[in-house]
Image (spheres, helix red, strand yellow):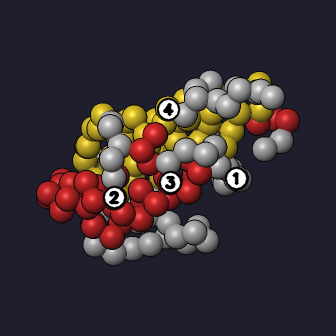
Amino acid sequence: MNDSTKKSDAHYAIGKKNPNLPFHPAVRAGDYIFVSGQVPKDENNNMITGTIEEETLATLKTIERVIAHEGATLSDVVRITTYLEDTRDFGRYNRAFLEGIGDAVLARTTVEARAVINTKIEMDAIVYKPLAPKA
């Protein structure tokens, strides 16, 4: 994080911004973390292609890596919106999602989106992770 991405101690960018995109991987705003749309990538930021199940689990791992910078886990996620390339994948995606999300108590919306490019899935998330009190 640099000064141009920090609005305050409670409002700042999380993660390294792709210079070709006009947004950050996530933004902290008080006790919430808003995660931009994430796609299936490995820990080196390389795209993962595979079945809808593989891409679903990999996308959840991508979100997990982004929010880990703030000490959050998938159990802190309160909302996910999923964009599927093809809604015929819904049943298989849903089973993989249940496997990957663990014990999170969350709201979720799933839509078909033609703007999902070079992947079967994209997810954004809202995370509730209260800021640690200042020492």
Q: What is the distance, in whole Å, between disc 1 and disc 3 at their CAs?
A: 15 Å
Q: Which mark is residue 100?
A: 2
Q: Which of marks 1 and 4 is in front?
A: 4
Q: Residue 128 carries which label?
A: 4
- Marks 4 and 2: CB-CB under 8 Å? no
First reached walking from the N terminus: tag 1 or tag 3: 1
Rendered residue at 59%/42% (across/down): 26
* Above/below status of 81 relative to 59: above
First reached walking from the N terminus: tag 2 or tag 1: 1
Which residue matches tag 1? 16
- Marks 2 and 3: CB-CB under 8 Å? no
Q: Is mark 3 on a helix, strand or loop?
A: helix
The amino acid type of the residue labelled 1 equals: Lys
Q: In this view, does 100 lie to the left or right of 66?
A: left
- Marks 1 and 3: CB-CB under 8 Å? no
* Above/below status of 40 relative to 23: below
First reached walking from the N terminus: tag 4 or tag 2: 2
Residue 77: give x, y in percent of width and height. 43, 40
Q: How many callouts does the rendering have? A: 4
First reached walking from the N terminus: tag 4 or tag 3: 3
Q: In which quarter of the image is the C terminus?
A: top right
Residue 89 visible in the shown view: no
Q: Observer-nearest residue: 71 or 9?
A: 71
Q: Which mark is residue 42?
A: none
Q: In which quarter of the image is residue 106?
A: top left
Which residue matches tag 3? 64
First reached walking from the N terminus: tag 2 or tag 3: 3
Q: What is the distance, in whole Å, between disc 4 and disc 2 at their CAs?
A: 18 Å
Q: Quadrant of residue 31?
A: top right
Q: Observer-nearest residue: 2 or 113?
A: 2
Q: In this view, does 1 lie to the left or right of 60?
A: right
The amino acid type of the residue labelled 3 equals: Glu
